[in-house]
Amino acid sequence: MPRRIDPLRSASFRQPVSTLAPRNRSPLQEILLRYGARLRALVETHCGRNQGLDADDIEQEVRIKLWKMLESDKTLDFPASYIHKVVATTVIDALRRAEIRQAQSLEPELEALIDPSVQGPLSPERQAGHRRWGSLLLRCIAELPERRQLPVQLALQGFSADEIAKLTGCTVAAAQQLSYRGIEDLKIRLKELGADAIDE
Amino acid sequence: MRSMNDELLKRHYRQATSTSAADTDHRLSAAELLALANGQSLGDRQLPALHGLARSSSQSSALQLLAACQDWSTELAAELHAATRPTLVERWQGWWQQVRFAPALASAAIVLMAIGGARLMHPQTANPPGMAVAPAERALFRGEFEPGDQVFAASLESGEAPDHLFGGNFDS
């Protein structure tokens, strides 16, 4: 027989972690809080503030969704795939919201003051520098041999050679060689075009 | 101004691709990202999905996060399962609550207990007549043959009267 969950405790569960006294937490809450801290660290590492995401928000949203399921489903037997899916939908929803916010934002200075997760505005000189860098980079990637373009782009997005190999279906050695040589060619071409001289 | 290195290139590329993938063909759903994080192929959608990752730093970040969350999900599921698994007493109580309103089961249990009690109190009547133990040493046919035994033992001795059946011509 599954253990009963005290609904009063679930109300307190929605409070910020710091305000919950340890004696008021159930064992399940303890587990979710402990794993929530780990999730927060993972979100900060992989989808930090440069993506417009707040790790605290993601962690709290995932924790509340799981807690609601624990309350409603008395059998309480979650497969790992279900938990993984909860994280995926929460992160994707947050990213889409951030994209919409970015697209609709007319006053970034004001938004940065209201929401600290939004990056503050760059100076006009730095913005111009970033734009020049970006356009040069995209242009040079487009000039690379076609078979090198995708591995180079994925490597620049932070994927390892092993991950690129799994995604593209080639060997790890091929992924490593294509991305390495492509990036070296890219550096040479960027120097030729004067990217070194661009002030950030 | 900085010298060009891999980290600088990555940072600029991710900034240049921070806006969303505009066309729907390159937008990945949560299910597609999960499948890729689990090492599955998307079939016909694989190549557009890879281009979507290449052109969108937010989608790439989401995939990297989901790949990193696999162990986290497995460990959390195991801990929740262990924390919510009922103890032996709780399982027995749950079973009893389920069956206590079933009169048929209850009456069957009473009958079984009565039979068991009767057998314990009178063990000698428990054996049905058909099960009576046969005598240990009893054989239908028993014979001991010794080397000298014969089924038909006969002898014709010399000097006896000649046979009448063959007119005295029978010679043994």
Image: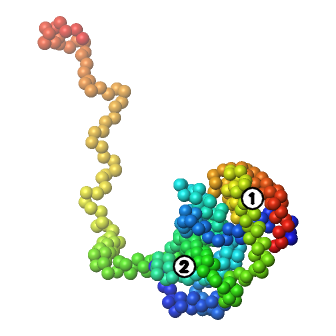
Q: Could you tell me the amino acid type at mark 1?
A: Cys
Labels in figure, total = 2
SS category of the residue bearing label 1: helix
> Relative to B52, is A171 above or below?
above
Work out whether residue A79 or residue A116 is closer to the camera in this orientation and state it. Answer: A116
A73 relative position to A191: left or right: left
Residue A42's label in the rendered image is none
Q: Position of residue B97 (x, y in %)?
A: 38, 81
SS category of the residue bearing label 2: helix
Q: Give the chain letter at badge 2.
A: A
Q: Quadrant of residue A46?
A: bottom right
Q: Note whether residue A176 is visible.
A: no
According to the image, label 1 marks what residue?
A140
Work out whether residue A5 or residue B71 is closer to the camera in this orientation and state it. Answer: B71
B118 relative position to B93: left or right: left
A132 relative position to A111: left or right: right
B74 relative position to A72: left or right: right
User: Which-is-in-front pick, marks 1 and 2?
Assistant: 1
**Which residue occupies 70% across, 68% down?**
B16
Q: Could you tell me the amino acid type at mark 2?
A: Leu
**Circle 1 residues within 10 Å: few <14, some 14–19, many ≥20:** some
- Distance from label 1 to label 2 (Cα)? 45 Å
**Which residue occupies 70% across, 57% down?**
A142
**Which residue occupies 61% across, 77% down?**
A103
According to the image, label 2 marks what residue?
A66
